[in-house]
Amino acid sequence: LVLLLILSPPRSVLYVAIVYPQDPVLRMGSNLTASCWVHPELGVHANSLFWTLNGHQLPSSLYRVLSPTNLSVTLAGLNASRQTSGDNLVCHNHKGHILAGSCLYVGMPPEKPVNLTCWSRNTKDLTCSWAPGGKGETNISTLYKLKYKLRWYGTEKECEDYSHTQPYSCSITQDLHLFTPYEIWVEASNRLGRATSDVIILDILDVVTTDPPSGVTVSRLGQLEDQLSVRWEAPPALKDFLFKAKYQIRYRLEESQDWKVMNDVGNQTSCRLAGLRPGTVYFVQVRCNPVGIYGSRKAGIWSEWSHPTAASTPHSERLMSCDSKSSGDSNSTLRRELKQFLGWVKKHAYGCSSMSMKLYDQWRVDMQKSPKTRNQVGKHP
């Protein structure tokens, strides 16, 4: 590519004109030859001129004097533009004054956008995000457009509500249709080329997510030192929809960042956490998956986690007796049997299984009723 820069001197003022091309857009790795021509009336010889690129003087080995008034420079294997506004290639006289210049845009055509994903918050919108193809950088201004249409009879439309915080995201907020599949794709274009993503087909009801559960509370269960009760409310935004919610709980120790997730909560709005450490603060969060809205067979999309709610388990109280050694032995046996049973519960039942918790409660009641019952329980493996 040859770029010709001309300086034309009418009377007392010097004007710079770029003849061809204006603000060229070049592929990375291409070559460029630029030429700076000075009007003979200026009395400036080409030998006294020099070139700069982004303010840095280019070595004279790249120059070629084409005539007493014409100096060219050749740049081989151009790298990507260092700034989005382009690279400034400037011709100077021997005093450093600017005689002519051009803005170079060096980059690559876009590659096919990838990872196109969409979701609907409470069926009120349809938001899609994607990622640029390849390495993700074209180094020149590239425009992305989210396009969509109803699958069988719709006309092509462009999403208008592009996110200012997420660079590759847009939300469709008007004229949404339920029970009708959409075709959705992304088009990328710049001055070096264009590319189109794969088309995805989806129904809004299959990609619904919702707000986190509200009213999350965590409380003790009397003086049970290893348990906490968690309760919450279903997302109010979906109260008028026919669906079956699915919930997850996660919890962690106050001093830890490792969460333990309980996946077997089901659609109930309460759960009992067991096997906890006595006298310890726990943080608890809950999230919701609106499964099967209006009969959808898709798995649904999990909501964000609720804000952490904290509670502590009771401190462990040692069983003490001042009456006799036999009473102390009895208490020691009770604690040993309790520890054995808790070990059995942890091994055979976990999560929020209501059956195992009811069995555990009944066992504790029986243990407190009579020594005979304790002896019978202690004989089981």
Image (cartoon, rainbow, N blue to C red):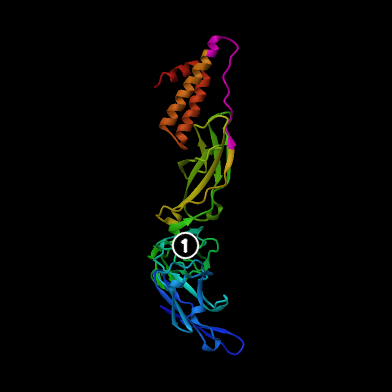
Give the extent of the magenta segment: 311-328
- Of residues 348 and 86, the one nearer the viewer is 86
- The answer to whether any part of residue 150 appears in the image is no
Which of the pair 7/332 is nearer the observer? 7
Give percent across and percent down for residue 329.
Answer: 52, 13
Using the image, determine if residue 267 lies above or below residue 129.
above
Which residue type carries mark 1?
Cys
Q: Quadrant of residue 295?
A: bottom left
Q: Position of residue 15 (x, y in %)?
A: 57, 84
Residue 315 is one of the magenta-drawn residues: yes
Residue 35 at x, y = what percent?
46, 80
Tell me the residue at 44%/18% (across/down). 376
Dominant SS type (magenta): loop
Q: Between residues 208 and 188, which one lies in front from this camera angle?
A: 188
- Total labels drawn: 1
Please say whether residue 7 is visible from this viewpoint.
Answer: yes
**Residue at screen point 45% across, 25% down:** 341
Across and down, in percent, residue 202 comes to: 41, 62
Question: Where does label 1 land, which residue?
Answer: 128
State the image quarter where residue 3 is shown.
bottom left
Query: Does the segment drawn in magenta span residue 119?
Result: no
Instruction: Please state, as top left, top right, bottom left or bottom right, where the C terminus lies in the image.
Output: top left
